[in-house]
Amino acid sequence: MSKSKAKGVRTQEFTEFDQRVGKAWSLHIQGQDEAAIAEFKALVDEWPDHIDANYGLALAYKAARYSDQAREQFQKVRQYIEAERARQAGDDTARFQMLLRMVDQHLATLS
């Protein structure tokens, strides 16, 4: 995730941001997808290329049966993962490969 693109999120605030991401994931896991969507949207507004927040938003859209929005969001997630993987070319990219497979599986179910 590109920290340079974090809007309104300073280094010392990353922990707070991560806690907010965790709260949004909790809402989604509890089946409160409309609330999760609102939380994830707010997070993505602040940090547009945050992979976990975007992926959570895509899953919440899918769970709430907003197929068009889910598909669009998964496509964005795919682009962010590819961009991050390219930036970290020498690093271990297993996480990104796994995420890409999961995104592609979700996209296949939405086709």
Image (tube, rainbow, N blue to C red):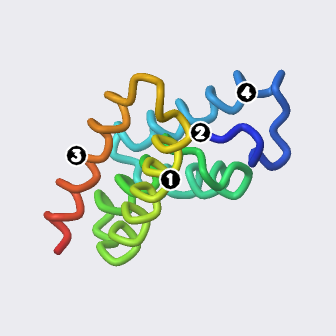
100 left or right, relative to 46: left
> Which mark, residue 101?
3
What residue is pinned by disc 4? 14
Please name which of the two marks, 1 or 4, marks the residue nearer to the observer: 1
Q: Is residue 76 left or right of 43 when viewed as pictured? A: left
Disc 4/disc 3 C-alpha distance (Å): 27 Å
Q: Give coordinates of residue 42: x percent, y percent.
A: 67, 54
> Element under label 4?
helix
User: What crowding class fits label 1: few (fewer than 14 Cα within 10 Å), some (14-19), or many (20 or more)?
Assistant: many
Identify the residue at horizontal 56%, vertical 51% (top origin): 40
Distance between mark 3 and mark 1 Cα atoms = 14 Å
Camera-side mark, 4 or 3: 3
The disc label shown at residue 80, or none: 1
Callout 1: SS: helix
Label for residue 1?
2
Q: CA distance from mark 3 to mark 2?
A: 18 Å
Please, is residue 69 above or below residue 87 in the view?
below
Q: Residue 53 at what x, y percent from top left?
A: 53, 45
**Vertical relation: 7 (above or below) 111:** above
Q: Residues within 10 Å of mark 2 (few under 14, many from 20)?
A: some
